[in-house]
Image (spheres, rainbow, N blue to C red):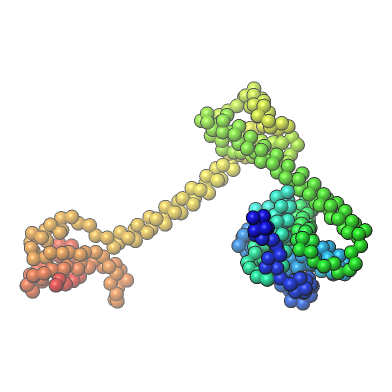
Amino acid sequence: MSNRIFDFINLHNGEEDKRKVLENVISNISFRGSNLWILACAIIIASIGLNVNSTAVIIGAMLISPLMGPIVGAGFALGTFDFALLKKSMKNLVIATVVSLLVSAAYFYLSPFKDVQSELLARTAPNIYDVLIAFFGGLVGVIAITRVEKGNPIPGVAIATALMPPLCTAGYGIATFNFSYFAGAFYLYSINCFFICIATFFVVKYLKYPAANFKNIRYARQIRAGITTLIFVMIVPSFYLAYRLWNEKTFTKTVENFINVEFVNNGYMVIHKKINYNSNPRKVELALLNKQLTDIEIEKYNRILKSLGAENTELSFRQNDDNLKAEILNEINKKESAISEKDLAINKLRLELDQYKFSDSTLVKELNILFPAIKNISLGKIEQYPNTDSVQMQFVILYQSLQKPEEQKVKDWLKERLNIRNVVMIKQD
């Protein structure tokens, strides 16, 4: 039974020849000629995606990027003690990184649109979850590389590990001289590179790829010590950033609950809300539409907020603030202007439709009394061409048993009754 279970999880099943895998890895390391051009184009595409906040464009750039090659090569080099391959991989990774930073920085420097979008902001504060994504994405990638049937995990790994967007965000930081963005994004890129490399190293060791040189025990210990040190160096800051993110989410949730319980549920309309977690002290700014607070009440609400766990927080209210009123009026005017434009468009369409509508409830009754042979009546207004640009009234009468003299009488009667010139009589089969 245990052997059967082991067969299910055995990575040696379906494994490609180790020499072919190594040849394939080595061939994808170099960044010269076409690979460099593809990388530069992918960087520009990813930068545009971040610039216009388009997830689809960013995903497309990740799919065509060749950045995984030297990272996987470094993992294979560590696992097989091939220091020549490691040197080559690191050299090409540095070249690719520098080119990517230069291309993305040039794009964002020349781009007239430098607003910070949500897709760009998402790459400035990495945490432990990014470590997990990079590691397990790297595992999937290297497992797929070592298979005879590659399948479709490789594109998914390129998307999941997301090497391009943080590099482009770091380029944005350089172009706008925002070095906090550069530091956060480049740290995320470093996390992705390192943990893809480590995942590759573990799989290579598990699959027992042969050492390129004589495996010196001292070298093996140095590599293990170096990897362990780098893991701690990479993970510790990410834990701290994850802890900060958790604290910020908790703080925001506490403030939102406080606002709902103390104001919204008591019938007070909150027309302005601003939460600043990163200031010292943290600040919460509110404005109420139908409530004027005294200093005693403001102090009381500060104590309530503090008792809920929002320590080192200053709660303030904007009251009798002309600037706030002006901001709200501007927003209302914008919305009213948009509504007015819609109403005008709707009224215009209604007027156009009314030109083609005809309603006279007594007309059909009179026709039925005067001309019983007429069974069905269709009537309306149409535009008549050629010789006129105006909308003309034209009637179409469907009848079954109407003699020619009566047909002419119907026409004459309708022309006189409605003061129109055109009446079309169609005999119904």
Q: Nearer the viewer, residue 270 or 15?
A: 15
Where in the figure is residue 160, as x and y percent of width and height? 67, 59
For residue 219, which quarter of the picture? bottom right
Vertically, is 387 above or below 196? below
For residue 148, which quarter of the picture? bottom right
Q: How many marks?
A: 0
In the image, taking residue 413 as reference, residue 154 lies left or right, namely: right
Asked whether the viewer can see residue 91, the reply is: no
For residue 278, which quarter of the picture? top right
| Residue lying at the far top of the rendered structure | 296
For the N terminus, the image quarter is bottom right
Where in the figure is residue 369, as x and y percent of width and height? 8, 59
Q: Nearer the viewer, residue 394 or 193?
A: 193
Q: Residue at x 7, y 72 (%)?
A: 403
For the C terminus, the image quarter is bottom left
In the image, taking residue 185 as reference, residue 334 lies left or right, namely: left
| Residue lying at the far front of the rendered structure | 1
Where in the figure is residue 186, as x and y percent of width and height? 78, 56
Q: Residue at x 73, y 42 (%)?
A: 243
Q: Residue at x 59, y 43 (%)?
A: 327
Vertically, is 354 above or below 295? below
In the image, taking residue 130 as reference, residue 334 lies left or right, namely: left
Where in the figure is residue 161, as x and y percent of width and height? 70, 59
Q: Residue at x 64, y 24 (%)?
A: 300
Q: Nearer the viewer, residue 248 or 1?
A: 1
Q: Nearer the viewer, residue 140 or 121?
A: 140
Asked whether the viewer can see residue 304, the reply is: yes
